[in-house]
Image (spheres, helix red, strand yellow):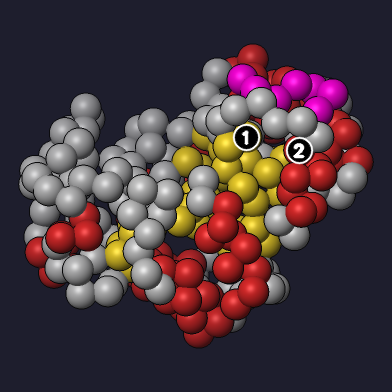
Amino acid sequence: MTIVLAHRGASGTKPENTMEAFIAAERAGADGIELDVQLTSDGEIVVIHDTTVDRTTNGSGLVKDFTRSSLQNLKANHHFKHYFKKACKIPTLIEVFDWMQGNECLCNIELKNNIFSYEELEEKVAALIYKYSYEKRIIISSFNHLSLQKMIEICPAVETAPLYNHYLYKPWEYASTLQASGIHPKLKIITNDLIKTTMEFGIHVRPYTINKRRDMKRLFQLNCSAIITDFPEKAVKLKKVLERKGHLSQ
């Protein structure tokens, strides 16, 4: 059965990569969340997508040049289109992991180290996973596929999946060469046949970013491993309708 992962939380209706977005995703019935991590100048793991804070906050500059404290003083919903009475902050991965102790959500962590390498990012993330005993609740993805191999070496119990946005010949074979258990392709470059064949080889397929109803329906009916969406509430609702009508295979 296809699981629903909330892309940067319920980012279609809440400020992306904030606790508000993650909480909303869990309340909507999502099976898990997807988030992005980088390191601050003082070595803390923070949850933010862009390498700069400009798009999502009232600050300016590179994430790596801020301390954790200075980052968390920024307003993370400054440019968000919907009105919020209170300011949202950039969370640390520790704050997300603490919140996960009160639910059963999976967490797909994207390592944002394809532009800046962030020395020891993998080690720091792995240490936290072990500290919280979340080995079975975490999926590690990245566009930096060398980083995924490093994660496998230091945290072999955690699932890994390469992110990619170009056409790939026999993606199940590529995943196997990385010792990855899944692939996270951009939707437009993955066909129904490729999805089916990849899963037949035991590789999970979790396309991104699935926001249109027709695309959700297509992937649900294919029994795709997961979808990654900005609108988990819409995806969960559609999935329930299809289940009730008997349109989904078990």
- Gap in angstroms between the C-alphas marked 2 and 1: 9 Å
Q: Earlier in the sequence, mark 2 or mark 1?
A: 2
Can residue 78 be seen at all in this image of the molecule? yes
Q: Position of residue 70 (x, y in %)?
A: 10, 64
Residue stretch rendered in magenta on the structure: 188-194
Along the line of sight, the residue nearer the viewer: 36 or 229: 36
Question: Which image quarter is the N terminus in?
Answer: top right
Question: Which image quarter is the C terminus in?
Answer: top right
Residue at the (75%, 21%) spot, across then down: 191
- Left or right of 72: which side holds 226? right
- Left or right of 187: which side holds 67? left
Can residue 84 be seen at all in this image of the molecule? no
Check disc 1 and give the amino acid type: Pro
Q: Which mark is residue 171?
A: 2
Q: Position of residue 80 (x, y in %)?
A: 21, 33
Along the line of sight, the residue nearer the viewer: 112 or 16: 112
Check disc 2 and give the amino acid type: Pro
| Secondary-structure class at tag 2 | helix
Give the overall secondary structure of the magenta segment.
helix
Q: Are marks 2 and 1 in contact (CB under 8 Å)?
A: yes
Residue at the (75%, 45%) spot, across then down: 174
Q: Quadrant of residue 236?
A: top right
Residue matched to label 1 = 185
The 10 Å Cα crowd at callout 2, few under 14, some 14 to 19, many 20 or more, is: many
Q: Position of residue 181 (x, y in %)?
A: 74, 55
Q: Position of residue 178 (x, y in %)?
A: 71, 56
Along the line of sight, the residue nearer the viewer: 170 or 182: 170
